[in-house]
């Protein structure tokens, strides 16, 4: 069973020791909890895949503690990347560019590109300060399940398979980083996330979000992902709510028909999309653990972080309902 230790010097030292010895550790970032290993040690990285039950075709993000480290892991640094790094790092933006030989293919799933980000969470920063390698870290959940935004979510899913979870409270952004591919002339968002498309366009011009899967670039793009165990349906009209079953509601700001639901989670009473993103996975975990027959989710406005929330809701929706 994993030890869950609150953020402290002791916790950081334990994590660093485990990482230096080729082990894995779960730790908070500003987006979601990550499951980290030494990104330059293939045997350590393999453990991540085993614990998460993650297919080997799914590449992992390298987390770095200093901006200068990009030259070790990218063979080419694009002007657009420089501008984005200047503006958004440390923070929830992951950039994809061609990799150097240093980066093992197990990290990139055989691709010649590598995704890198510099996290802003104090726990991630404190760990990265004390090591001289990047941390390869996907979200600390079982592949395809809800991402963890609290230490207990990690414990529920993979606590029996890892040694240490550092508890840094709830992740302040709450949804994963935006993943942008800059390997071609186009600016392509492979996964909407913590930095909204509009903010990126202010810096590098037009950005496309790839909706249709021609080739699976990024398994964040697989149609089913981020799924709760309970069936989930996006609610277009309250008339659709079935009677006589235990229904839960993921509401955006206010609840119109509370009597229809046995459990309700509200994303943001103020209707603030940042707050909604922060609460998103925690609310879904709560609903998923409430013994419901179905979770209904109200759509949120598709602007700024609302796009990233809707992206995850559509992937969580149970396809057989459509
Ligand atoms: O916020 C986040 O990004 C969190 C925290 C822990 O940093 N990490 C995270 O990792 O969400 P993961 O593995 O759950 O999602 C990373 C996404 C996946 O969809 C993966 O396929 C994609 O990034 N990705 C990674 N490297 C890639 C590459 N070279 N080319 C295309 N997609 C890549
Ligand atoms: Mg993930």
Image (cartoon, rainbow, N blue to C red):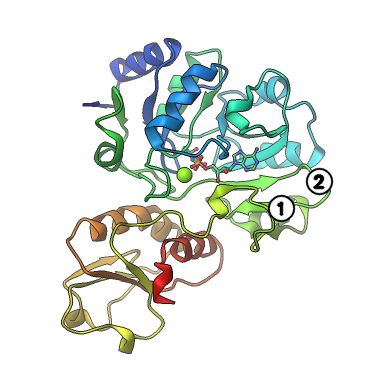
Q: Which of 112 and 87 is in front in this view?
A: 112
Q: Residues within 10 Å of mark 1 (few under 14, many from 20)?
A: some
Q: Which of 172 and 107 is in front in this view?
A: 107
Point 49% across, 24% down: residue: 45
The answer to whether mark 2 and mark 1 are in CB contact below 8 A is yes
**In 3D space, how far apart are the residues under numbered discs 2 and 1 (Cα atoms)?**
9 Å
Q: Which of 120 and 184 is in front in this view?
A: 184
Residue 57 image point, x, y percent: 58, 39
Point 21% across, 55% down: residue: 289
> Which secondary structure, mark 2?
loop
Determine the quadrant in which ligand 1 lies.
top right
Residue at which label 1 appears = 188
Point 44% across, 48% down: residue: 173
Residue 182 image point, x, y percent: 75, 44
Residue 13 image point, x, y percent: 35, 13
State whether residue 245 is above or below residue 150. Answer: below
Instruction: Mark yes or no: residue 252 visible.
Output: no
């Amino acid at each position: 069973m994993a030890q869950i230790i609150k953020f402290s010097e002791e916790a950081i030292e334990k994590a660093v020791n485990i990482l230096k010895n080729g082990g894995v550790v779960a730790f908070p970032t500003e987006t979601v909890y990550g499951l980290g290993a030494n990104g330059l040690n293939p045997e350590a990285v393999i453990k991540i895949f085993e614990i998460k039950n993650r297919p080997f075709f799914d590449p992992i993000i390298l987390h770095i503690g200093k901006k200068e480290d990009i030259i070790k892991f990218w063979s080419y640094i694009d002007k657009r990347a420089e501008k984005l790094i200047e503006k958004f790092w440390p923070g929830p933006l992951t950039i994809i560019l061609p990799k150097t030989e240093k980066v093992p293919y197990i990290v990139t799933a055989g691709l010649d590109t590598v995704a890198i980000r510099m996290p802003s969470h104090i726990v991630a920063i404190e760990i990265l300060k004390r090591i001289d390698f990047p941390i390869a870290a996907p979200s600390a959940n079982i592949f395809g399940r809800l991402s963890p935004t609290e230490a207990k979510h990690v414990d529920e899913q993979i606590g029996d398979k890892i040694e240490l979870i550092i508890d840094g409270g709830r992740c302040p952004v709450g949804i994963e980083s935006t993943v942008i591919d800059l390997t071609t002339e186009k600016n392509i968002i492979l996964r909407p996330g913590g930095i909204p498309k509009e903010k990126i366009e202010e810096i590098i011009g037009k950005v496309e979000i790839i909706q249709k899967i021609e080739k699976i670039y990024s398994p964040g793009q697989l149609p089913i992902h981020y799924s709760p165990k309970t069936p989930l349906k996006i609610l277009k009209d309250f008339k659709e709510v079935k009677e006589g079953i235990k229904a839960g509601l993921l509401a955006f700001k206010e609840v119109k028909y509370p009597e229809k639901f046995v459990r309700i989670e509200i994303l943001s009473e103020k209707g603030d999309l940042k707050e909604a993103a922060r609460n998103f996975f925690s609310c879904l975990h709560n609903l998923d653990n409430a013994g419901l027959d179905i979770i209904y989710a109200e759509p949120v406005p598709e602007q700024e972080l609302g796009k990233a929330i809707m992206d995850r809701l559509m992937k969580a929706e149970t396809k057989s309902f459509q």
